[in-house]
Amino acid sequence: MTKKSLRKYSKKIVDGLEQAPSRAMLRAVGFKEGDFKLPQVGIASTWSNITPCNMHLDKLAVEASNGVESSGAKAVIFNTITVSDGITMGTSGMRYSLVSREIIADSIEAVTAAQGFDGLVTIGGCDKNMPACAMAMARLNRPSVFVYGGTIKPGPKKRDIVSVFEAVGAISSGKISEKELLEVEKTAIPGPGACGGMYTANTMASAIEAMGLSLGNSSAQEAVSENKLIDCRKAGEAVMNLIEKDIKPRDIMTKKAFENAITVVIALGGSTNAVLHIIAMAKEANIDIGLEDFTRIGKDVPVLADVKPSGKYLMSDLIEIGGIQPLMKRLLSEGLLHGDCLTVTGMTLEENLKNVNDYPPDQKIIMDFDIPIKEDSHLNVLYGNLAPEGAVAKITGKEGLFFKGKARCFNSEELALAAILKNQVHAGDVIIIRYEGPKGGPGMREMLSPTGAIIGKGLGSDVALITDGRFSGGSHGFVVGHVSPEAAVGGPLALVEDGDEIRIDAKNKCIDLLVEQDIIVRRKDKWARPGSDITRGALAKYRATVTSASQGATTEADSW
């Protein structure tokens, strides 16, 4: 390829006499004469001081920039936003969490397309950053590499953010003192990096690596480490290789690649949010992935990782024994991964894994196939008269596979949490939290505060929780989310009343309201959607364009 052909987009910005104004502007930000003849690579960083997950990404962006420029291209760093789930959890601010996924994807698209970058490195550190980066990469379809900002080091006694949420539940039931809560609060988050268990950040980083959009073990590195700096430099170098070979994200994001991502998420016992995000990423890549694919793949893939929130270990422990690459090699040898999928190295997944060593023989984090944590997927897609379009449950088996109880209905997360903390929720209850879906919230908040309080009170096996909202990757217990259609559009969840019997059957993939159909019809006739104070701004625009959770809760414009 000629240098000009490597500048498919940037040449339109900087070539020719008529683009002298563009070059004048770029000279002011540091471009030299020779830079105008080089491919331009955007470095999309989600750095901010808002959250520990992203507080170090400015340094990683510089390393990626160094890698780009050492390979013969010109790097341009730009920023986009992030929203902290951990900080906003349980508040109205959490409405913006899932919305931020769309804003981040839109902003990366806007800057990259406007500025004419020939390639892209995206760097994400928190839950929504990562699928947003992948969505933008697919949408733009320019040579791109994703970099994960890395996981946090654990606090004392292997504490993390979930430890704090569960401590709030413990103090409300008198299990710990205020002094003990403060000690947990002060020690749980020791520095930079994403939440330390197999929560949504580590889940999505692993999924994206399995899909082939990041370099080997990018998902399994601590935020503050030499390995992460090396990962960033190599990512910058890799983009130039992709530009030269004209390998684009949609060449990598095939149906098989998404199946690989789903397989790895299941084997790791990953977050329910992966269902939303993988469907959303697939839409941007024009790949048909839906709830049924999680069920189909989940029949054959066991849960192998004994990691938090349901297990014992943190991502830092998994890093010590080799990360996720040995796991992928094991899955490949069992015929559970597609080895012929192209990756950002320019090689196939099988080629990338060829020289990967297996885990140490004495490790206890990744189980053998003959002694799995669970023989099939923990991500259960349930259907029934309560969720005609599907709901997603995270059932590891430790909670049991069946729950039947009486409904306790709450029209917001705040009302449910208050009842839990005031000891008004009891064994056998099925907590219903509704009007928290994509449109109803709007924004589909995560329910970590209620689930954390339930676990902290010791009710994890005795109480079920059903919502049209989402769960944090840190949530565990008998929980069912993403109920579709949601309550705000008149879905069956809106019609449940206190005392109604509800049956959740994970073995048979069912979730049902045990009320006569004629009664449900009468309730439907009387139902009216609650009013909302959201009339303008980002949340209002999101509500107007967002799809159902069963379709990834993506924003879609009407056809022109």
Image (spheres, rainbow, N blue to C red):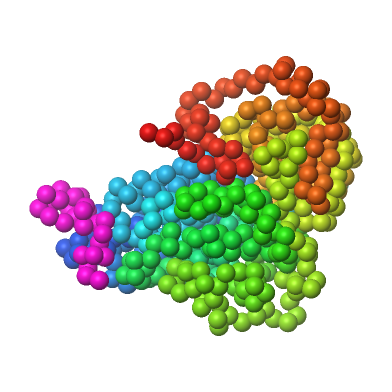
Residue at the extreme top of the image, as rendered = 526
Q: Nearer the viewer, residue 176 or 31?
A: 31
Q: Position of residue 358 (x, y in %)?
A: 65, 80
Q: Position of residue 204 (x, y in %)?
A: 58, 57
The structure residue drawn at horizontal position 54% and vertical position 63%, both measured from the top left corner, is 257
The structure residue drawn at horizontal position 16% and vertical position 56%, both measured from the top left corner, is 15
Picture mark count: 0
Residue 77 position (above or below residue 104)? below
The structure residue drawn at horizontal position 62% and vertical position 30%, both measured from the top left corner, is 440
Residue 194 position (above or below residue 167)? below
Residue at the extreme left of the image, as rendered = 17
Residue 365 in which image quadrant: bottom right
Examine the structure image and report whether residue 24 is included in the region drawn in magenta: yes
Image quarter hosting the N terminus: bottom left
Residue 32 in which image quadrant: bottom left
Q: Position of residue 175 (x, y in %)?
A: 86, 47
Image quarter hosting the C terminus: top left
Q: Is residue 30 visible?
A: no
Q: Is residue 451 left or right of residue 152?
A: right
Residue at the extreme front of the image, as rendered = 518
Q: Is residue 507 left or right of residue 163?
A: right
The structure residue drawn at horizontal position 30% and vertical position 56%, both measured from the top left corner, is 117
- Tell me which segment is drawn in magenta: 1-27
Q: Position of residue 154 (x, y in %)?
A: 66, 62
Q: Is residue 78 visible?
A: yes
Residue 59 position (above or below residue 273)? below
Examine the structure image and report whether residue 131 is included in the region drawn in magenta: no
